[in-house]
């Protein structure tokens, strides 16, 4: 009897996932890539627990969680603001989320800074300010790379496909 982990099963599952991935919206694809990078980074920094420095993986996890939330609010907020019905409250909500994102970024760095330099040390803190900062970085890289690859395919990343159908 073959086990569940068989190369045919894995390739079948990966093929189904690839077909499903192609149907996702661009924002969902980017969110998935950010989550995958966060998981890979966390697993790569997992050694921090074994060397007595849990601040490395936990700082990356905090930074990545803030970054994913920030991307989610940008993606959903822009689709909300660009919807067809004009409402002045939408602009205020967009401004609120913009300020809230910046405050969240600052709070993550302040928490990481206090945990690194005030409450612990670089070698034994529970949250490292540098890995929190590094956790913020993949969003820019993912957005630049996905926009570049979509433009290479001939797709216009800034165009709204639904808007083009209505014209």
Image (tube, helix red, strand yellow):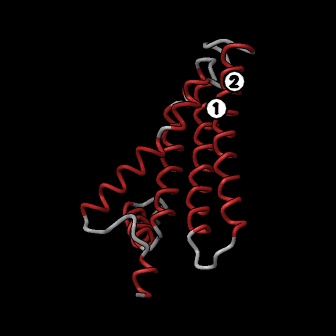
Q: Residue furthest right?
A: 119
Secondary structure of the residue carrying numbered label 2: loop
Viewer-proximal residue among 90 and 17: 90
Residue at horizontal 46%, vertical 42%? 138
Residue at horizontal 45%, vertical 65%? 26
Task: Report how far apart the C-alphas of labels 2 and 1 lie in the structure.
Answer: 7 Å
Q: Which mark is residue 126?
A: 2
Instruction: Sort mark 1 into few (<14), some (14-19) or many (20+) by Cα contacts within 10 Å.
Output: many
Q: Position of residue 132 (x, y in %)?
A: 59, 31
Q: Residue furthest bottom?
A: 166
Please give left or right for residue 81 compared with residue 33 in the image: right
Q: Position of residue 161 (x, y in %)?
A: 42, 77
Q: Which residue is mark 1?
A: 58
- Specify the quadrant that holds the C terminus: bottom left
Q: Earlier in the sequence, mark 2 or mark 1?
A: 1
Q: Is the C-beta separation of discs 2 and 1 under 8 Å?
A: yes
Q: Position of residue 146 (x, y in %)?
A: 37, 55
Secondary structure of the residue carrying numbered label 1: helix
Q: Residue furthest front?
A: 88
Instruction: Sort mark 2 into few (<14), some (14-19) or many (20+) by Cα contacts within 10 Å.
Output: many
State whether residue 21 is above or below residue 111: below
Please give left or right for residue 144 compared with residue 107 in the image: left
Residue at horizontal 42%, vertical 62%? 10
Q: Position of residue 130 (x, y in %)?
A: 55, 24
State whether residue 147 is above or below residue 42: below
């Amino acid at each position: 009897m073959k086990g569940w982990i068989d190369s045919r099963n894995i390739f079948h599952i990966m093929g189904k996932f690839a077909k499903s991935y192609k149907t996702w919206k661009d924002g969902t694809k980017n969110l998935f890539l950010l989550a995958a990078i966060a998981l890979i980074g966390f697993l790569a920094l997992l050694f921090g627990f074994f060397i007595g420095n849990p601040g490395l993986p936990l700082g990356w996890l905090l930074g990545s969680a803030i970054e994913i939330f920030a991307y989610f609010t940008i993606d959903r907020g822009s689709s909300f603001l660009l919807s067809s019905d004009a409402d002045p409250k939408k602009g205020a909500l967009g401004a609120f989320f913009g300020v809230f994102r910046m405050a969240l970024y600052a709070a993550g760095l302040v928490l990481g800074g206090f945990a690194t330099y005030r409450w612990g040390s670089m070698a034994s803190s529970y949250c490292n300010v540098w890995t929190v900062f590094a956790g913020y970085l993949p969003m820019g890289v993912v957005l630049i790379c996905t926009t570049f690859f979509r433009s290479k395919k001939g797709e216009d990343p800034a165009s709204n496909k639904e808007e083009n159908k209505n014209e």
